[in-house]
Amino acid sequence: MAWLQTSDAGKTAFAINRLRRFHHVQPPAMSAGSSNMNTQLSEQCKPRLYRLKFETPPDSVAFVLADSREAAWRIGKTVMAVLHGVGIQTVSLHEILSLQELVRVGVSEDEDMRIFELAVADGKVEQWTHAPYFLTDDTTLLGKWAELRADLAADVARTAMRRAK
């Protein structure tokens, strides 16, 4: 099983490089969650994807492929305990939701992006997942994450360019 946690420094560098590269070109109009890119989650990923939200370690989110909610719970608790060097009893899960449940409650135009929504208000995403753990090597899931980060970086760049005018 592979795992990856995104870093703030990497996201910041990506946004800065994107801004430098496109500062003189008007980017296409798009908002986070409705990208011009079109990564689709794989058929292997869709029925087995779960998002886990942890109370301990604080504010942690992980994505895992598992055959059931219970299996996702076991994998998540075990891996997080090992990664943080703590006993499994100290890892506390707050929420485990399947892709289907996340799609049902989400609002993004791109249904696959709904897995990354943490807070929604008035039909708009108020908070996206930040620095999640990917307890899988599914390239389509990682691609979807990269697509979201590119959308959000483009939004930051457009905002900066508007302010600079």
Image: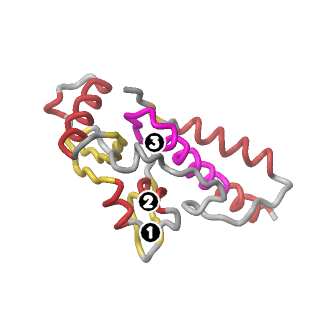
**Residue at point 48%, 49% (across, down):** 41
Mark 3 or mark 1, whichever is nearer to me: 1
In the image, taking residue 158 as reference, residue 42 lies left or right, namely left
**Residue at point 21%, 40% (across, down):** 73
Q: Amino acid at mark 2?
A: Arg
Residue 93 position (above or below residue 128):
above
**Range covered by the magenta-colored residues:** 132-154
Among the two numbered marks 2 and 3 on one chain, the one whose residue lies closer to the N terminus: 2
Q: Which color mode does the image show?
A: secondary structure
Whether the magenta-drawn stretch holds residue 91 is answered as: no
In the image, taking residue 100 as reference, residue 29 lies left or right, namely right
Badge 1: residue crowd in 10 Å (few <14, some 14–19, many ≥20): some
Whether the magenta-drawn stretch holds residue 151 is answered as: yes
**Residue at point 46%, 37% (across, down):** 138
Hey, which quadrant is residue 54 in on the image? top left
**Residue at point 86%, 54% (across, down):** 24
Q: How far, Cα to Cα, is label 3 from label 1?
A: 21 Å
Where is residue 142 shown, x and y percent of the image? 51, 40
Q: Amino acid at mark 3?
A: Ala
Q: Residue 131 got which mark? A: 3
Among the two numbered marks 1 and 2 on one chain, the one whose residue lies closer to the N terminus: 1
Residue at the disc numbered 1:
107
Q: Are marks 1 and 2 in contact (CB under 8 Å)?
A: yes
Hey, which quadrant is residue 159 in on the image? bottom right
Q: Amino acid at mark 1?
A: Val
In the image, taking residue 139 as reference, residue 29 lies left or right, namely right
